[in-house]
Image: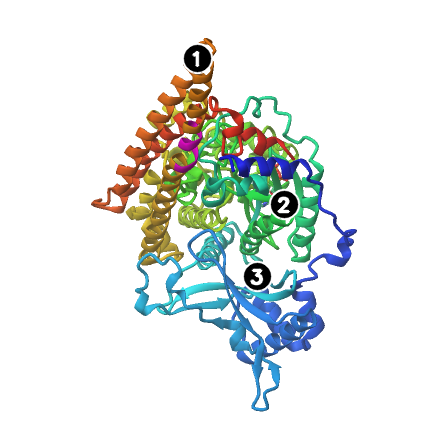
Amino acid sequence: MSGNEARVQAIFQITNREPMEVATPDPLSKIWACNVFNLAKMEESLSKNAFKEIKKTVQTGVPLDPATADLVAAAMKEWALSKGVKFFSHIFFPLTNITAEKHDGFIITNPDGAAITEFTGSLLIKGEPDGSSFPNGSLRMTNAARGYTAWDPTSPVYVMETANGSTLMIPSVFMSWTGESLDKKIPLLRSNAAMDEAAQKVLSLMGETDIAPLNSSCGAEQEYFLVDSNFANARPDLLLAGRSLFGAAPAKGQEFDDHYFGAIPERVQVFMQDFEDQLYKLGIPAKTHHNEVAPGQFEIAPYFEAANVAADHQQLMMTIIKTTAKKHGFHALLHEKPFAGINGSGKHVNWSVGNSTQGNLLDPGNTPHKNLNFLLFCGAVIRGVHLYGPLLRAVIASAANDHRLGANEAPPAILSVYLGDQLEAVYEDIKAGKLTSSNSGGIMDSGLSQILTFSRDPGDRNRTSPFAFTGNRFEFRAVGSSQSVSGPLVAMNTMLADSLNWIAEKLEVELGKGADQANAVITVLKELMELHGNVVFGGDGYSTDWHKAAVEERGLKNIPTTADALPALNEDYIVKLFESTGVLSPVELASRYEVYSEQYVLSIEVEAKLVVDMATTLIYPAAITYLSDLSVTNAGMADMDIELDNSVAKTVAAEANAMMAGVSKLSVALEKHDFASTDEHMSFLADTVRGLMDEVRVHADELEGKVADDLWPLPKYQEMLFIK
Ligand code: ADP
Ligand code: MG
């Protein structure tokens, strides 16, 4: 068997690929949320009183009394059993970007040996997985491993179907025996509460009397790649690291921009429709899908929802992309940079805050009163990004996302805010005090009327900004495609809470001095813009001029790698931010730093070991086989008195040697373990190991361009990206 058998087989298989046969899809009305135990289903199956209680809990998070919990659990069980479900599972979100489940049967046996089913309120409310194997960042010793999952009633329970059975899934939080958060959901719920409390203060000062609880909303656009599974299976790097660690650039990349919004290949279209039907069944509002910039890259965006539900749905969506892709003979890559030289994948997190009485507070609106609220909330965001930019950078930091940020395709690693020309002008005016002299009636004249225009026409987009205002929300564009949206949402809600608290304090002082509302707002925002206006930037975020000016003139931070970004979580002002808002205690925050840095270390080490392994066992042998073929041929030719040009052989030999020299250096680097601190270990990986991995790759990719095609063991970029 030749060294490239896997690749040849893959190409052979793919040549005969057809779109998967699918049954005629059911209409939306039939499948929408059919697997979700939502309020509508609860109303059907519960008494009036019980429904009233649970509805209050679902909508506002107030605790549920045990008796009602029993009733809800019983109704849930009946509904699930009617769908053929035998197991239930609390589903929770540990500090990795994955979801975790522990399945339990409804079954119990009675003394006669008969099987009956049981599901009580207490089983619904509390679970107890042995959590010791989940990352906890020193929050628990393994000998004190007790962890609890607890039902989060604000996110609906659902049934997850598999081919021969289904499971009732119960969205849950995950905490230690001592009550510390070990998950991504608890801080999200807390950050929302902190934001609500601060927003209530500001809105009250603004004279609002009827103020419903505020919630943050999130709509996340998910980018991903699809590669035929035959190719993926022949690439250990795609399977184990989620990205290609080797691969020469194809003759045709994305230069022609012919993939973006192009016709979706039929096989992919069939996959998407199947995938989206599954989302619909789970009540996930899939809204748009299209080709993305790179060949083989696609995007799906659901309609926005309450942040907590959106985060759960986002997580579920990532799981379903992968399983459905598999079913259709694809391998889905959610990695931020699966292929060098072409665009990576992000997850734009669209975020706004609002309630049922004041509406979306990041919508410029069309009455002066609303606009003042808007100006305050938008100002609060500006202050938040300026003060806590390093936190925003830290929550999107990962070994994988480091490949995107700062490369010329994704937002730079400098956090700035894009407002759009018109809004930028309004805040410039405020900063210059131009509106200060206007009385409250006059405020609408120049500046505020511009906002009205803005709300009708969101103006241009700025694809180079990491944090952009897009008409009625902010879009955090630097989030990575494989990341949970929870971290970014927690950071945004918390920084907003802090800013709104600051604004409330200042407003109270101004109003206390007798200033009218409009003048008080302008005074506070003027101070805010003087302190934080530096973060507003509407130009080209990719340009080297900006990189220089941002740091030298504006005092913003350029934070290129995860090794540089994560230590922000240990900074006093970040610890204070989370402690003062009640979102994370210092211990909880410290544990997050530990877990995330450990993940960074692990993922680079896995990649580096794979580089060593693949270079040694796949690529070097191909080069040697080719050299040996060439020398046999040469000898034969010499017999016939023909002298062949042996420059190719020389290059192959030189590159193979250089590659193996690189492998040696990398192996030595991986042996180093005597680091004084985690920070030092991370820096070593970022500054040294990454470079050594690249060095090996350069030579391997050279070899790919020289070694005979029929000997090359790994599917090539042009094959993975273009064959459908
Ligand atoms: P684009 O590609 O133009 O940014 P998309 O339609 O792909 O737009 O995605 C925009 C996302 O923003 C969607 O998920 C959408 O539901 C969401 N969105 C729209 N309005 C809001 C809002 N007020 N708050 C949060 N998300 C929003
Ligand atoms: Mg977008």
Q: Main secondary structure of the magenta part?
A: helix
| Whether residue 3 can be seen here | yes
The residue lying at 70 percent from left, 32 percent from top is 263
Mark pair 1, 2: CA separation: 49 Å
- Give residue 554's position: percent from left, percent from top: 36, 28
User: Over which residues does the magenta segment extend?
Assistant: 617-623
Count the marks.
3
Could you tell me if the residues under marks 3 and 2 are in contact, i.e. CB atoms within 8 Å?
no
SS at badge 2: loop
Work out whether mark 3 precedes mark 2 in sequence or the reverse, and give the earlier one.
3
Seen from the viewer's position, the closer of residues 446 and 112 is 112
Q: Which residue is mark 3?
A: 155
Q: Earlier in the sequence, mark 1 or mark 2?
A: 2
Residue at screen point 43% across, 17% down: 635
The amino acid beneath tag 3 is: Ser
Number of the front mark, 3 or 2: 2
**Disc 1 target residue:** 638
Whole-angstrom CA distance, mark 3 to mark 1, is 76 Å
Q: Up-down: is 128 above or below 637? A: below
Residue at the bottom extreme of this rendering: 112
Q: Quadrant of residue 645?
A: top left
Q: Secondary structure at mark 3?
A: loop
- Mark 2 Cα within 10 Å, few/some/many (few <14, many 20+)? many
Tell me residue 19's x, y (percent): 71, 42
* CB of mark 3 near ligand 1 (< 8 Å): no
x and y percent of residue 361 in the render?
A: 56, 46
